[in-house]
């Protein structure tokens, strides 16, 4: 079996081998190549010590990201490569990192410390595939299995439980039984891991091809109670509504799978109905309603994502999408659509449309998205014609108004807001002279 290594990576391997060191591509890059995927990046493992790596690649920019752990990044215009010395690890005392790291001369030692068999393979063109834990066989069987005892691997680093679920979700593999049960047993210790590392794995699960698979695995192992406890009340929650064939949890997971793999959209799908268990009211006919669940859900999303240390930008995008997801019931005219674009932003408006399509399709078999498709078409037309939906698009600004004699202050914003209303009703009025006339006619008395 021969794998094709990119020339810039092969050049680095050749340089190490020419000086008498062993060198292999390792880990995820080997796994991805065996899966027929192009790796995002390449790691090299070698018998050379960190100082020797730096010396060999002194004609490159190098970054020392952890010399005591044996890792040097060699920068190349085709891609940076992490080169790490073969190493063995001591005991893990805190469930996060080893107490000590020692360097080795054997690639097998380096592979023995890795998490899963599919990540514990090394390759170079001279030696071929080094696969002491049958990772290639597990790839063909579509199995996630730890290197050695799953209890040992998970107790060393509890984040590996999240990684296990993430790989199973991304690759659509099964988790080997003993590995899965160990993941379930040790899941309660995930709290010892930093929330940033947990969130990183969680977000990768969400943008996988079938994210519901990952959420169900989080549920089974007990991690959902820790990572996203807000979702737990939705499990088995009957909507008591003829328009919904599924309970809240299965509806949410259906929407999650039907949305595009864009993080804020997937998060909005996860949160869009999360407040339903808290807002249920039953009318005289026994039908369930969830008034205000969109607004409460947006608040819950903001709180949960803040806990997960998400960026402010991501939090606000998700907040707006969740808050606006129910407006597909509204019959907007052009002015209403422009206000919607103004609230959501032209960058996110089509993400909202995708969320709404998925939401409708997952409600019941007879649901139609025709009205949303029509709305999407009209929004595209508005944007293509550059019809104004924010005051910044008006053919007049605050300085123009001051030149007309209006004083600087809140009145300028009030006038621009009024003019925007007029222009949203009639785009033809977005001309400076017409806008000046409208402003004077309405506000001249306050000059």
Image (cartoon, grey):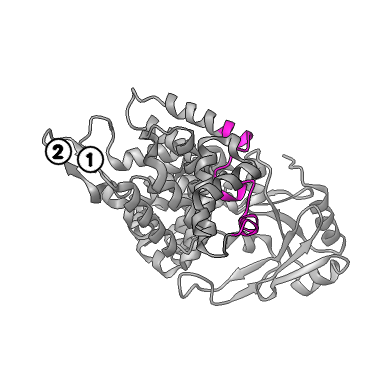
Closer to the chain start, of discs 1 and 2, is 2
Within-10-Å neighbours for mark 1: few <14, some 14–19, many 20+:
some
Left or right: residue 108 compared with residue 350: right
Confirm whether the magenta stretch covers residue 410. Answer: no
Q: Specify the label residue 435 is tagged with.
A: none
Residue under pointer 2: 283
In this picture, which residue range is highlighted in magenta? 380-405
- Is residue 350 shown to the viewer in this render? no
Q: Work out which quarter of the rendered image holds the N terminus and state it.
A: top right
Confirm whether the magenta stretch covers residue 398. Answer: yes
Residue under pointer 1: 289
From what the image shows, is residue 47 above or below residue 361?
below
Q: Residue at x 49, y 70 (%)?
A: 96
Q: Residue at x 53, y 45 (%)?
A: 420
**Mark 1 touches mark 2? (CB < 8 Å):** yes
Q: Residue furthest left?
A: 284
From what the image shows, is residue 111 above or below residue 258?
below
What x and y, as percent, mark residue 109?
63, 64
């Amino acid at each position: 079996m021969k794998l094709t290594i990119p020339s810039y990576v092969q050049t680095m391997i050749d340089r190490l081998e020419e000086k008498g060191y062993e060198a292999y591509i390792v880990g995820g890059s080997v796994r991805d190549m065996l899966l027929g995927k192009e790796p995002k990046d390449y790691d090299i493992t070698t018998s050379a010590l960190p100082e020797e790596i730096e010396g060999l690649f002194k004609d490159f920019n190098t970054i020392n990201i952890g010399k005591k752990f044996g890792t040097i990044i060699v920068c190349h215009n085709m891609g940076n490569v992490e080169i790490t010395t073969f190493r063995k690890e001591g005991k893990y005392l805190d469930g996060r990192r080893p107490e000590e790291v020692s360097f080795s001369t054997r690639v097998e030692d380096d592979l023995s410390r890795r998490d899963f068999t599919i990540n514990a393979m090394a390759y170079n063109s001279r030696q071929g595939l080094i696969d002491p834990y049958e990772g290639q066989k597990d790839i063909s069987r579509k199995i996630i299995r730890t290197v050695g005892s799953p209890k040992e691997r998970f107790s060393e680093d509890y984040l590996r439980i999240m990684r296990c679920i993430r790989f199973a979700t991304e690759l659509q593999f099964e988790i080997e039984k003993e590995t899965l049960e160990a993941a379930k047993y040790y899941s309660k210790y995930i709290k010892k891991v930093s929330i940033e590392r947990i969130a990183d794995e969680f977000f990768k699960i969400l943008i996988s091809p079938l994210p519901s698979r990952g959420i169900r695995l989080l549920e089974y192992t007990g991690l959902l109670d820790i990572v996203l406890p807000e979702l737990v009340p939705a499990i088995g929650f009957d909507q008591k509504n003829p328009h919904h064939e599924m309970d809240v949890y299965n509806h949410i997971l259906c929407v999650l799978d039907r949305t595009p793999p864009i993080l804020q959209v997937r998060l909005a799908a996860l949160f869009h109905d999360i407040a339903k268990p808290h807002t249920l009211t039953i009318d005289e006919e026994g039908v369930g309603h969830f008034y205000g669940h969109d607004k409460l859900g947006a608040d819950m999303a903001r709180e949960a994502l803040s806990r997960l240390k998400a960026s402010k930008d991501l939090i606000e995008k998700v907040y707006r999408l969740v808050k606006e997801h129910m407006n597909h019931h509204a019959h907007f005219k052009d002015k209403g659509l422009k206000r919607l674009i103004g609230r959501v932003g032209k960058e996110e408006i089509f993400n909202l449309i995708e969320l709404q399509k998925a939401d409708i399709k997952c409600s019941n078999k007879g649901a139609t998205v025709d009205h949303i498709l029509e709305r999407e078409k009209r929004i595209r037309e508005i944007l293509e014609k550059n019809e104004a939906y924010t005051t910044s698009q008006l053919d007049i600004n605050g300085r123009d108004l001051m030149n007309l004699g209006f004083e600087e202050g809140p009145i300028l914003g009030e006038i621009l807001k009024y003019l925007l209303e007029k222009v949203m009703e009639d785009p033809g009025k977005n001309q400076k002279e017409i806008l000046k006339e409208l402003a004077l006619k309405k506000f001249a008395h306050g000059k």
